[in-house]
Image (cartoon, coloured by chain):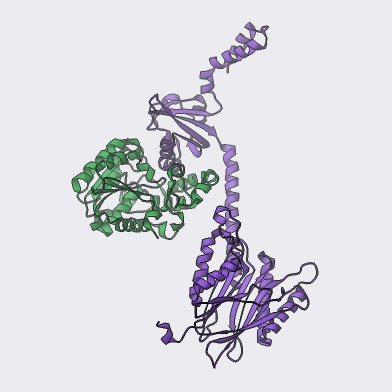
Chain colours: A green, B purple
């Protein structure tokens, strides 16, 4: 399968410049980055893509088996790096994608110049016995799955024609915006489970490339102490707190987010 | 709106006619804009772009049991949601609102101060300044208790329907498998391959085929198509398949075999519910003198076989005059014999292939047809059984949804002696 169309890869920015790859998290697609891309394009080659199952990725490539763990996504990521052959990249992973970056860098450190972990959480579920506070209980995650289901009726009627459409079609402009944040409820459920039930705390210490932990000042999903935990567990990592409310600094504080990414990526490459 | 206002205005302008009624209504509405906001039959909420609550109406405060000072400037909209709803808000709602400037009809649950939960439908728009810059978010919130109960019921019904459909598909797939041989018999000196293309996962198709050993180093094969689809057709398919196998053991002459099936179908399905099928039956005998196989084919109204020769030529093998099996008490069955030499390939097919629409994707009605099928064979020859089936599968793929009937194909091929194959 053609990896580029599978993941709806878009390469933009300065040719020959250091490479920054932007990976969206659970819920949306590469359009999440639209406010930071213009700034990053000025200095870097920017690689955007949709995870399989999201946005305009090839939905036929999705399977429950492959995408029931972060390993499937990590495989995709490394396949993308190999296919694009752009040399060591700075990988920017938002939310759950931050942990994909951690796993990928642990497996093939030579593919990465550095990692930017944006609003990361290695484990969302509290573990009181270990003194770990991720912010959520297992019941909370069930509640999210219910929310996804509750908005399933609206999805299926309005979105099915778009999502069933031919992913090879070139006129994607309108489709991109209309498919944004909407996905097959089956896929959303599985991705929600992967996102919120994975525990990658032990993998953090395996990161041997430069890493920047960029957290939001007020984030209901990844609270500051989780960012501090990630920073403490990744040897030699830097920590920056972005002045942003919510879980999506690339939307809430795009200038500051782009500046932090650019400063880090510029310094290491 | 307040009763006092009504009376004041009504009293002053009582005798001034319908024109002034309009003015009166207009004044009424103007006067009560604030009241309409506060006591509207839905919740109103204005927040800053980061979600911090700036203004909230009395209706929503009453629903949730808050005082204005509990919320304004103190809480974020997402804090009014359940934890699951908050996750949905952060990962879907807020990003979509940023993208489109509006989002409507999202089902969420609000938490009241007494711990109860209120199912609501939420619609938000971003208010923009003169330069298009976003200023604040306006949100309306509808009580969705009744509607949610209805939707939950609908969702449950839909999930039940999805499960039933999965069950039906599993059943159909299983039934379909029982009508086809799990693997084809291994015939020494013959390369065989078959494919069954399922047109609909919801219905059992009526195509069938088999290849099996008979006495004294001979082999029987058949391929056919029962008229109709679904469970009723599957019953006939099953009957046809075991009748053909049993009849071939009893008396392997192809005309006798098909005659036997004709008798059985006439006997079983007489009267109001006649059932019939088209079948081609072949008896394969190794040719000890010339190599390859001698094949006697009998056809009951079935599309002719395609012979692709070692020399690169291809032809159809006509079996003219053969009648549908199961219609008349004494169906006429025609036969033909062919010598399948080393390098030759014989392909049997059902008409799902030749009647497929070639450009269904763009709404075209063209059918593939016999001529194109012969051209396909000519382009393919010389070939092998596996090569033929893989080419047919490729062909079916190009038709996509244009294949509206099930399609069965069975190819047999006599490999050349090993030394020839090296060329």
**To which quarter of the image does residue B25 belong?**
top right
Residue that sits furthest to the bottom in the current view: B289
Is residue B112 shown to the viewer in this render?
no
Total of numbered circles in the picture? 0
| Residue B110 x/y as whole percent | 48, 36
Of B146 and B233, nearer the camera is B233
Considering only vertical position in the picture, is A138 above or below B198? Answer: above
Instruction: Name the side, left or right, on which A230 lies relative to A5.
Output: left
Locate the N terminus of chain A by quadrant.
bottom left
Instruction: Name the side, left or right, on which B245 lies relative to B86.
Output: right
Considering only vertical position in the picture, is B292 above or below B27? Answer: below
Q: Name the residue located 77 percent from the left edge and 78 percent from the top edge.
A: B330
| Residue A132 x/y as whole percent | 31, 48
Instruction: Name the side, left or right, on which B420 lies relative to B155.
Output: left
Of B133 and A74, nearer the camera is B133
Of B52 and A182, nearer the camera is A182
Considering only vertical position in the picture, is A254 above or below B386? Answer: above
Of B216 and A50, nearer the camera is B216
Q: Name the residue located 71 percent from the left edge and 76 percent from the top edge.
A: B321
| Residue B293 x/y as whole percent | 56, 86
Residue that sits furthest to the right in the current view: B271
**To which quarter of the image does residue B322 belong?**
bottom right
| Residue A203 x/y as whole percent | 28, 55
Is residue B76 shown to the viewer in this render?
yes
């Amino acid at each position: 399968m053609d990896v580029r169309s599978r993941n709806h890869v878009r390469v933009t920015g300065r040719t020959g410049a250091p490479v920054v790859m932007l990976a969206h998290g659970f819920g949306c697609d590469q359009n999440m980055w639209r406010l930071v891309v213009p700034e990053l394009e000025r200095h870097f080659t920017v690689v955007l893509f949709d995870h399989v199952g999201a946005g305009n990725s090839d939905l036929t490539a999705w399977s429950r088996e492959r995408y029931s763990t972060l390993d499937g996504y990590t495989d995709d990521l490394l396949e993308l790096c190999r296919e694009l052959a752009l040399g060591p990249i700075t990988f920017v992973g938002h939310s759950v994608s931050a942990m994909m970056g951690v796993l990928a860098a642990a497996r093939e450190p030579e593919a990465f110049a550095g990692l930017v972990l944006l609003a990361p959480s290695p484990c969302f579920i509290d573990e009181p016995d270990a003194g770990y506070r991720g912010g959520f209980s297992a019941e909370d995650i069930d509640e999210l799955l219910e929310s996804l289901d509750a908005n399933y009726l609206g999805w299926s009627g309005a979105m099915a024609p778009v999502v069933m459409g031919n992913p090879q079609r070139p006129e994607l402009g309108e489709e991109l915006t209309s498919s944004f944040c909407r996905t097959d409820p089956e896929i959303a459920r599985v991705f929600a489970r992967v996102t919120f039930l994975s525990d990658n705390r032990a993998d953090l210490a395996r990161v041997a490339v430069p890493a920047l932990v960029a957290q939001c000042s007020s984030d209901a999903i990844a609270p500051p102490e989780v960012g501090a935990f990630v920073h403490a567990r990744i040897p030699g990592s830097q920590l920056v707190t972005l002045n942003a409310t919510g879980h999506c600094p690339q939307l809430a504080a795009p200038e500051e987010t782009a500046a932090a990414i650019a400063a880090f990526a510029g310094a290491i490459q | 709106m307040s009763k006092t206002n009504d009376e004041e205005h009504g009293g002053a302008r009582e005798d001034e006619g319908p024109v002034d009624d309009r003015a009166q209504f207009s004044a009424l509405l103007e006067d009560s804009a604030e009241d309409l906001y506060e006591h509207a039959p839905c919740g109103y909420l204005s927040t800053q772009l980061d979600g911090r609550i700036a203004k909230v109406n009395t209706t929503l405060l009453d629903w949730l049991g808050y005082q204005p000072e509990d919320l304004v400037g103190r809480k974020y909209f997402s804090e009014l949601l359940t934890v699951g709803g908050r996750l949905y808000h952060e990962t879907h709602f807020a990003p979509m609102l940023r993208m489109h400037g509006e989002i409507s009809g999202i089902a969420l649950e609000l938490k009241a101060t007494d711990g109860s939960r209120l199912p609501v439908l939420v619609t938000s728009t971003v208010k923009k300044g003169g330069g298009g810059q976003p200023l604040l978010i306006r949100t309306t919130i509808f009580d969705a208790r009744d509607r949610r109960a209805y939707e939950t019921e609908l969702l449950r019904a839909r999930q039940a329907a999805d499960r039933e459909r999965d069950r039906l598909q599993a059943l159909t797939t299983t039934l379909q498998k029982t009508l086809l041989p799990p693997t084809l018999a291994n015939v020494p000196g013959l390369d065989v391959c078959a494919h069954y293309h399922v047109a609909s996962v919801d219905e059992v198709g009526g195509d069938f085929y088999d290849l099996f050993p008979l006495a004294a180093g001979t082999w029987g094969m058949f391929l056919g198509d029962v008229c109709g689809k679904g469970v009723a057709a599957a019953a006939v398919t099953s009957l046809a398949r075991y009748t053909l196998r049993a009849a071939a053991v009893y008396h392997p002459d192809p005309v006798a075999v098909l005659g036997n099936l004709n008798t059985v179908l006439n006997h079983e399905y007489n009267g109001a519910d006649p059932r019939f099928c088209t079948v081609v039956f072949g008896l394969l005998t190794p040719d000890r003198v010339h190599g390859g196989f001698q094949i006697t084919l009998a056809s009951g109204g079935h599309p002719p076989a395609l012979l692709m020769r070692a020399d690169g030529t291809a032809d159809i093998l006509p079996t003219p005059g053969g009648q549908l099996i199961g219609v008349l008490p004494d169906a006429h069955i025609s036969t033909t014999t062919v010598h399948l030499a080393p390098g030759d390939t014989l392909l049997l097919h059902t008409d799902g292939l030749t009647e497929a629409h070639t450009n269904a994707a763009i709404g075209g009605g063209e059918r593939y047809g016999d001529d194109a099928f012969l051209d396909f064979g000519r382009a393919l020859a010389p070939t092998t059984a596996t090569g033929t089936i893989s080419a047919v599968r490729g062909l079916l793929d190009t038709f996509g949804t244009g294949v509206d009937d099930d399609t069965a194909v069975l190819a047999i091929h006599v490999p050349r002696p090993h030394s020839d194959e090296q060329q």
